[in-house]
Amino acid sequence: MCSSDLAVRRRRGDRIAIARHLRAAGDLTSAAYRLEAFVAGAEAATDEAALDVARELLGAAIEVADPDTRLELLARRAAADFALGDVAAGAAAVEETLAGARVAGRWDLAAEALLAEANLGFPPNITSAVERIERIDEVLGGLDPSRVALRARLQTWVAHTLVNVDHARAL
């Protein structure tokens, strides 16, 4: 590892440490300052594959975030939950994100939450697959057509699922 790699890792570690110290300090600083530190720390932890720390710091960020930012952070926490194998927590975060996204019209965040769930792999049965596809169809209906990459990711997941559960619809 070269010295520049070490410097990058040290800065990431600093962001994580600062976020954890601010979390322990409570309300001694503004919510906006803590939110920024918590998100930076979570991003640094994710970069280091410390997903448990990322989930912890995303949880702290969710506590101090405004409603719109909270939805974005919930979708990100869902991905961390699923990656850590905590399916129940991930599913709860997805459902909360979907509910809030519907109200706020933030279909991009609903899409990100569903894609986090899709990282679990294919649904365990046809009924579950159809339910997920219906949720994705709802999100695609609300998602801005200009979000081409996000739409493509959702449609690819649907196509892969349909090939496994409903060949006629897949074609």
Image (cartoon, grey):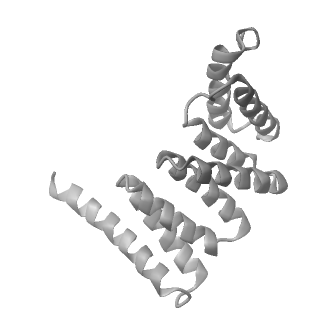
Q: Position of residue 97 (x, y in %)?
A: 71, 54
Q: Residue at x 48, y 79 (%)?
A: 23
Q: Position of residue 100 (x, y in %)?
A: 77, 57
How many labels sit on residues? 0
Q: Residue 59, position in %: x, y?
A: 56, 66
Q: Is residue 95 above or below residue 136?
A: below
Q: Residue furthest bottom?
A: 28
Q: Quadrant of residue 104?
A: bottom right
Instruction: Give left or right: position of 19 versus 139.
Output: left
Residue 61, percent across and down? Answer: 57, 69
154 shown above or below 12: above
At horizontal 48% and vertical 46% (from top left) the residue drawn is 83
Q: Nearer the viewer, residue 115 or 129?
A: 129
Residue at 69% across, 71% down? 66
Task: Answer above or below: position of 28 versus 95.
Answer: below
Residue at point 66%, 41% (across, down) = 114
